[in-house]
Amino acid sequence: MTSLHAALAEPIRQSLVETLGDDTSVRVVAVENTIGLHVLRDFPYPCCTYSFQPKGSQRRICFDIHMELAACIVGRTIGRGDEIRVVDVGQIGRDEFNVISPVAGRLMREIVALWSEVVDMDIIEPEIETSNVYVMDTRIASDDPMFHIRFEVTWNDRVSHIYLCCPAPSLA
């Protein structure tokens, strides 16, 4: 699973270079086979979680862009470490979705391209959620078996994460 999803690192990096800079790097740092409740514990509140439903599946694939990373993608000037305030990285505004949604769209298409040789996939019903409570209610069931892939994103002496959450049956 680690080597399979490592193939997403460079496309993710390319999607982020325009807004974060050429020194951006991305790598897979963890892969877990767990349940939905354990996946959601890593999501911040508020969150920036995109999900989409693969054709022929009742379950959704989610990926969460950590709020510090989301704030930097949309061009907010924020502190570092202890200087980061919740207000600086809080909710993504409607106007900011126009900046981050193309990045998220590329990530969705790269996931589909990676799996397309094995699973017949199309992106249907893509959605964005900013509350992890609603992600749990409608996207990830607490007892669903999941693969949880964590990508580390580094740029400009910062470190953040993107989490990819896939229902285990979709990768069986």
Image: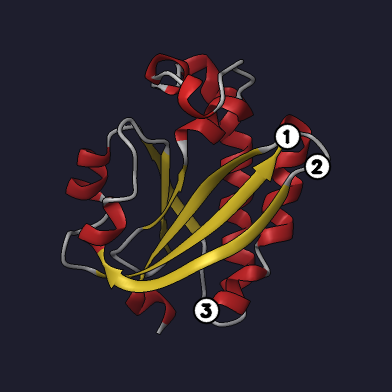
Crowding at dot 2, Cα within 10 Å, few <14 / some 14-19 / many 20+, comes out as few
Residue 71 location, x and y as percent?
54, 25
Please tell me in which quadrant of the rendered image residue 117 appears.
Answer: bottom right
Asked whether, in this view, residue 162 is left or right of residue 61, the answer is: right
The answer for how far apart the CA atoms under marks 3 and 2 are is 26 Å
Taking depth in this image into account, of 141 and 28 the one nearest to the observer is 28
Which residue corresponds to the image point at 69% horizontal and 37% vertical from the top-left?
157
The local secondary structure at tag 1 comes to loop
Please tell me in which quadrant of the rendered image residue 46 appears.
Answer: top left
Asked whether, in this view, residue 165 is left or right of residue 114, the answer is: left
| Quadrant holding the C terminus | bottom left
The local secondary structure at tag 2 comes to loop
Residues tagged 1 and 2 counted as in contact (Cβ below 8 A): yes
User: At label 3, which amino acid type do we have?
Assistant: Met
Q: Which label's residue is closer to the chain start, 1 or 3? A: 3
The local secondary structure at tag 3 comes to loop
Residue 68, numbered circle: none
Is there any visible trace of residue 85 in the rendered image?
Answer: yes
Q: Which label's residue is closer to the chain start, 1 or 2? A: 2
Q: Please identify, in this view, whether the residue under mark 3 or under mark 2 is nearer the observer.
A: 2
User: At label 2, which amino acid type do we have?
Assistant: Asp
Q: Residue 16, relative to residue 41: is it above or below?
A: above
Residue 1, numbered circle: 3
Which residue corresponds to the image point at 37% horizontal and 35% vertical from the top-left?
47
Q: Which label's residue is closer to the chain start, 3 or 2? A: 3
Which residue corresponds to the image point at 72% horizontal and 33% vertical from the top-left?
20
Location of mark 2 (residue): 23
Location of mark 1 (residue): 156
Residue 125 location, x and y as percent?
40, 48
Taking depth in this image into account, of 80 and 128 the one nearest to the observer is 80
